[in-house]
Amino acid sequence: MTVPVEFFDGLRRSMQKAHPAIPVDAVRDAGYAAGQALFDHFSAWLADRSEHGPDDLVDDRFPILLREYFFEIGWGLVQLASLSDAVMVLDANNWGEAADDTNGCPVSTGLFAGFFGRLADAPISVLEVTPESASGGGQCRFLLGSVDVLNYVWEAMERGIPFERAATSA
């Protein structure tokens, strides 16, 4: 069964409406748990296409298959690229959780942390940042890296340093 991406926006909205005091961290945690299951679904999707498993994919093939996977399951367009030696950037466009009036993509943040953490077999931190081209809804940008690296990026951003500069110096 494939879950439409709009489910995550609906989950976030209904949780925040029913329980306004629920911290965003709880919503992210729900996404994290779903991210690990999403990894299993991605693995099965690869096997159905006679592709190597996620752990054995060639590095330049992985972003292409990731984009195809999310598009095919109806979640939107994703593009994964290297921002620096230690930080990857994932752009999500036409993303259901990123509606015009949204306060970010906390479910997707957790989802990608669970998904990529499972892929890396190590904790991966995911930080949502505002895309430079943000001109309305439907877009989210995420930074992916180790916990220590993204803590450094976050602290630099709090001091007013743009995330791109912080990521390249991490």
Image: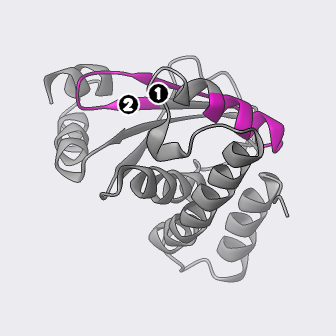
- Residue 17 picture location, percent across and down: 72, 74
Residue underneath mark 1:
58
- Mark in the foreground, 1 or 2: 1
Q: What kind of element bears circle 1? A: loop
Q: What kind of element bears circle 2? A: strand
Q: CA distance from mark 1 to mark 2?
A: 16 Å
Query: Where does the magenta region start and end?
Result: 65-89
Determine the residue positioned at 23% across, 40% down: 158
Q: Earlier in the sequence, mark 1 or mark 2?
A: 1
What is the tally of numbered marks visible in this picture? 2
- Residue 120 picture location, percent across and down: 36, 50
Residue underneath mark 2:
88
Residue that lies at the very extreme toward the front in this rendered image: 50
Determine the residue positioned at 19% across, 42% down: 149
Residue 55 visible from this viewpoint: yes
Which amino acid type corresponds to the residue marked 2 in the rendered image?
A: Met
Q: Which image quadrant for residue 39?
A: bottom right
Depth check: give the residue in front, 83 or 67: 67
